[in-house]
Every structure is written in structure tokens, then in C-alpha cells.
Amino acid sequence: MLKYKRILLKLSGESLAGDKDFGIETKTLIYFANQIKQVTDLGVEVAVVIGGGNIFRGLSGTVKGFDRVIGDQMGMLATVINGLALRSALESLDKNVILYTAMHMEPIGDVYSQHKANAALSSGNIIIVSAGTGNPFFTTDTASALRAIELQTDAFFKATRVDGVYTADPEKDPTATKYDTLTYDEAIQKNLKIMDITAFTLCKENKMPIIVFDINNEKNLMDIIQGKSIGTRVSE
């Protein structure tokens, strides 16, 4: 039995770097591609959004002298590079993949539209949505929330390197404890930084459940899809 039949999976750009500080580690790329393949082989419809922080982060670039708009545009291009890499990895596993971009970049990818993307998912394709929202000042978390809502996914799966949402950063505070479930209001009141406030507000207003989980455990994505309680679920 599948608890989730259509999902939006958000991968951070930094996660693609693996053990490196920069770029794309092939072993990690294939590792993620295999997890996506496994759930789509069960019939789950998957849309993926990837960040670009392994190549360039627009906001941090402003500290180094970049104009914020130009920096964000560079970050958008970084997400397209990551999207191309993931598409190639998935195609090597015999999956049908369509890469969409939030701006005109043919022939690299098709321009995103809700109608085309929805039809592609319904036809059994994996879709990768890159270039954020196509606008500066918006994060890929916000783009992920927006696409999840547009495509009416069952949940927004936010892949991280920790196994859920904690009372504090578990990598810094050994006394931090994990939440199994949270309401949107609890997360706001406790100031839990699940993602940026724009993305979180979009999910809250549109009642889009958020699943925060550890992508580095290869069984987690499959187990959550099949209904096991893993990570942290944020909902009403």
C-alpha cells in the first residue's frame, strides 16, 4: 500500500557534493537517482526540485560583491546544471525524465507550466523543475512549495542530512530532541527553522504537508512512501 502517490522531492544542492565542498559527486548523484527510481518503479509520481548551493549561492554571493539579482540568477543557473546531472543519472537507469526550467532555456529544458508538468507526471515521467521560480529573492524551498501546491502533490518531501525536525540543531546541541509530528502553528511558535518563512507560509495556507527526513538513509524515502513514520511530518 502506498500512502503517497504523488510527491514533490526537494534536494539541496549541497547534498549533491557528497563528501566534497563543491560540485557534483557522481556516487552521490547515482545514490539519489536510485532512490527515486525505486519509488517510481512502484508507481509513485515524482517531481524533483534541486538547489544550487554546491555551485553558487546567490545570497552569499552578495557578501562577495555580487548584485543580489545577478547573484540569484547565477544560483538559478546552478540549479539547471544540477537538474541536467540528475536527469542524466535517471536516464542511465532507464527512467523517462523531463527537465523543466522556470525561464526560456531551450533546448536545455522545456519552459515550466503547470499543465505540461501535470500531464507529464500523469503519464509516468519523472519531472525535474529547475531555475527556482524564475525570480530573484525567492529560495528553492519557496519554489518547491509553489510547485508542490501547483501539482497537487500529496506532500512536500524535504530531504535533509538529519532525521527530522529537532528542538535545536542536533549537530550542535546533543540534548536536542526530535519531533515526530508538528502543526504549522507549533512550528511557527517554536521558531523552528524548517525552511524560509515564504515557503512555510505557502504550505500552511494551502494545507500542504511537509515531510522532513534524512535522505542519506537509503531506505527512508521508500519506507515513508509506504506509510512508515519516519522523520517529522508538519501538517494541520
Image (cartoon, rainbow, N blue to C red):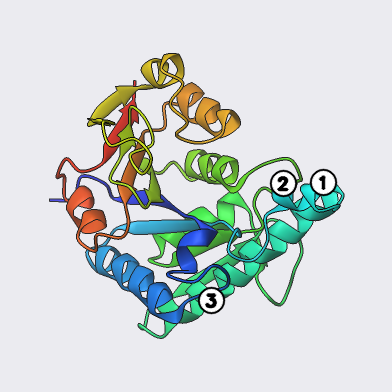
Which of the marked residues, 3 or 2, is nearer the chain's N terminus? 2
Q: Which image quarter holds the C terminus? A: top left
Q: Position of residue 159 (x, y in %)?
A: 38, 51
Q: For this view, does 10 lie left or right of residue 229?
A: right
Mark 1: amino acid:
Arg
Look at the numbered disc 2 and give the secondary structure of its residue. Answer: helix
The answer to whether mark 3 and mark 2 are in CB contact below 8 A is: no
Identify the residue shown where x is 36% and y is 52%. Answer: 161
Cβ–Cβ below 8 Å for labels 2 and 1? yes
Q: Nearer the viewer, mark 1 or mark 3?
A: 1
Q: Amino acid at mark 2?
A: Leu
Tell me the amino acid under the disc marked 3.
Ala
Residue at x 30%, y 60% (from the top left corner): 216
State the separation of the CA atoms marked 1 and 3.
Answer: 26 Å
* Whether residue 167 can be seen here: yes
Q: Name which of mark 1 and mark 3 comes first in the sequence.
A: 1
> Where residue 3 appears, x then y in whole percent?
20, 45
Residue 190, x across and y down, in percent: 41, 17
Q: Secondary structure at mark 1?
A: helix
Front of the two marks 3 and 2: 2
Query: 224 and 121: which one is in front?
Result: 224
Question: Crowdedness of circle 3 by 10 Å Cα count: few (<14), some, many (20+)?
Answer: some
Q: Which mark is residue 152?
A: none
The local secondary structure at tag 3 comes to helix
Q: Is residue 201 above or below residue 35?
A: above
Q: CA distance from mark 3 to mark 2?
A: 23 Å
Residue at the spot of label 2: 59
Front residue (pair 216, 207): 216
Instruction: Give the residue at mark 1.
Output: 68
Mark seen at residue 85: 3
